[in-house]
Amino acid sequence: MPKSRLDSWKSIAEYLERSQRTVQRWHAFHALPVHHFGGRKGSVFAYTDEIDRWLLTLAEETPSAASDKDGLESRRQASFEFSARALELWETHSEESLNTIAGLYRRAIGQYPGNTAAMIGLANTMISAALEGVMDTALAYPCAKEALRRAEQLDPQNADAKCCSAWLDMIHERKWNHARSGFEEVLRKQPESAFALAGSALAFVTDGDLYNASYYAWKAWRRNTLVSSFGAIVCWT
């Protein structure tokens, strides 16, 4: 059976019986599955079956949280399980899976707001969604910054948070030198971090150093050959 497609924010809003502003907010902050033609500035569309599945995930409850006497511990465990599922998808992420990954991280945060990994994972997902044209940067970057701010409050020395911060310095704040220093610091602690290697590659591009850009891009891609955006950076450099 062919999918039923909604071809504008207006039609998506009418399907959900909400305002356009509300559904745009849901897309930015709750991973409502909306796709873009021709990048983030292009027209939008959504499939009704994907929206219906998204609505069902919001309505799901964790059985253990409802039955376990120790509700907090149960919610913590559910949060870590959602994070683990999101991380598994992140390791091979593509444009199509970013909304799903963001949704899992949001559910993890909803179960336990102290889940630092979920905060950082959500920030990384928002950055990738903006870079790959899945989400408007005006919506994605503020969300990433807020998630990162909360993660840094929970764990100021977290290396993954520093990597995320370097990405935002580079692509949102345009602080090229600060970003490069951030990636270097992360790679000293985690030399095999594919996300930091990819960030370093783009940082070298901003500096006009395509030799090192290509070197770091290849290292990122070899670290995880299933992430399509890493392969794209290799081709580009």
Image (spheres, grey):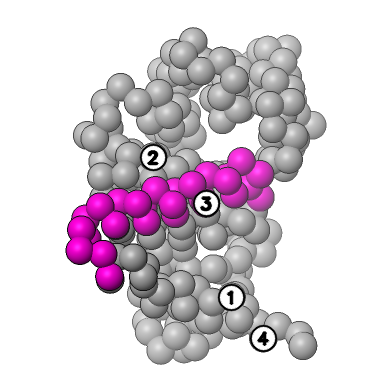
**Residue 172 percent location from the top left of the image:** 43, 37
Residues at marks 1 and 4, CA–CA distance in whole angstroms: 10 Å
Count numbered badges in the picture.
4
Which residue type does callout 4 highlight?
Answer: Ser
- The residue that mark 4 highlights is 4
Which residue type does callout 1 highlight?
Answer: Glu
Which residue type does callout 2 highlight?
Answer: Ala
- The residue that mark 2 highlights is 117
Q: What element carries label 2?
A: helix
Q: What element carries label 1?
A: helix
Q: Which of marks 1 and 2 is nearer the N terminus?
A: 1
Quarter holding the N terminus? bottom right
**Residue 7 percent location from the top left of the image:** 61, 79
Residue at the image position 30 percent from the left and 51 percent from the top: 76
Disc 1 or disc 2, which is closer to the eye? 2
Q: Which of 99 and 200 lies nearest the eye of the viewer? A: 99
Which stretch appears magenta?
Answer: 67-94
Location of residue 99 with respect to 209 vertically, above or below: below
Whether residue 88 can be seen here = yes
Residues at marks 1 and 3, CA–CA distance in whole angstroms: 19 Å
Whether residue 125 can be seen here = no
Quarter holding the C terminus? top right
Q: What element carries label 3?
A: helix
- The residue that mark 1 highlights is 50
Labelled pair 3, 4 in contact (Cβ < 8 Å): no
Q: Does the magenta stretch include residue 107?
A: no
Q: Earlier in the sequence, mark 2 or mark 3?
A: 3
Which residue type does callout 3 highlight?
Answer: Arg
Q: Is mark 4 on a helix, strand or loop?
A: loop
Q: Does the magenta stretch include residue 82?
A: yes
